[in-house]
Image (cartoon, rainbow, N blue to C red):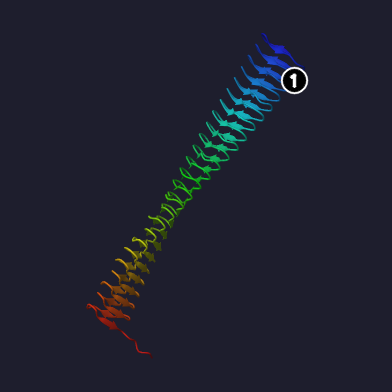
Amino acid sequence: MAAGVSAQATGTSAVAIGDDTRATDNAVAVGISANATAAQAVAVGDDSVATTQSIATGASARANGATTVAVGYDANAVTLNGIAVGNSAQATDENATAIGALSSATTNAVAAGVSASATGASAVAVGDDSVATTQSIATGASARANGATTVAVGYDANAVTLNGIAVGNSAQATDENATAIGALSSATTNAVAAGVSAQATGTSAVAIGDDTRATDNAVAVGISANATAAQAVAVGDDSVATTQSIATGASARANGATTVAVGYDANAVTLNGIAVGNSAQATDENATAIGALSSATTNAVAAGVSASATGASAVAVGDDSVATTQSIATGASARATGQTSLRLVMTRMQ
């Protein structure tokens, strides 16, 4: 059947309705200049085109490949099994699926959302303005999985390059093998950041916890934990560790290179300092303070609750013991307060 000025129904059971329409065997063309060019094609809409077993619906829709579907103004399904749904949606290769106005997809890829783009083979982009490349997945408005085999999930999440994973609103995996999980988190090469605003900014860094920071080969675990230099380890809320240092405990500070601070508010201030115990303080180089509230200065050792080795090379061992420069106090409440003095406190065996 042909109805319309210059309408052409040229094949068996063909239907052409509209001026200048064309339809062939078992095909249907409806609309001005609609063209169902091959068997079992359906073209509905002005200037629409459909080929073998394909469907084009909408003005200027194009279902150019076999078994393709194009729905919407200027939608285009280029080749075998392509699906394009939405105004100006583009399914440009085999098995491509583009759903949403201005969306686009290539070979075996899926794009769903306004301006969603699945630009590489087997890519999946879901969300308005989302982008995914080869074998990558982007889910969320403005999500970007720009590198091969990357994953970006969340509003404005961005996985920049190979194997990157970014999960959370504005999460950023900026280099190869980076993993950033949590809103506003970021990670670089081989690094892991997990937590709101967690930052793993150096190679192989690990930052776990809200507002954590870790740099090259460093580890920070806990809310606001901060491993500020290479090979540092900070574990505990508000803990801080610098180069090759270890801080373990809430508010522990290993501020000097190769220092150790273990315990709540323990503090090893400078080179080779060791502070172990709640509020233990190793305040100078090579100082060792072990015990709650203990303190030691340069080359000094304090061991015991509230033990204090306050001068260079002092040794205070025992609870509440005190030793000054080059002095030794051993025993509970022992005092060696003069330079080069020795004080031993013995307890009688009962």
Q: As displayed, is residue 152 above or below residue 57?
A: below
Expressed as whole percent of the image width and height from the top left, the position of residue 244 reads 39, 60
Q: Which quadrant is the N terminus positioned in? A: top right
Element under label 1? loop
Outermost residue to the right: 12
Q: As displayed, is residue 320 above or below residue 113?
A: below
Task: Tell me how many marks there are.
Answer: 1
Task: Identify residue type, mark 1.
Answer: Asn
Badge 1: how crowded within 10 Å, few (<14), some, or many (20+)? some
Q: As displayed, is residue 107 above or below residue 334?
A: above
Q: Which quadrant is the C terminus positioned in? A: bottom left
Residue at (30% x, 76% y) in the render: 315
Expressed as whole percent of the image width and height from the top left, the position of residue 287 reads 32, 69
Residue at (32% x, 80% y) in the render: 330
Judge by depth and name the residue closer to the eye, 5 or 167.
Answer: 167
Outermost residue to the left: 338
- Residue under numbered circle 1: 26
Horizontal side of 90 relative to 242 (left or right) equals: right
Expressed as whole percent of the image width and height from the top left, the position of residue 62 reads 62, 22
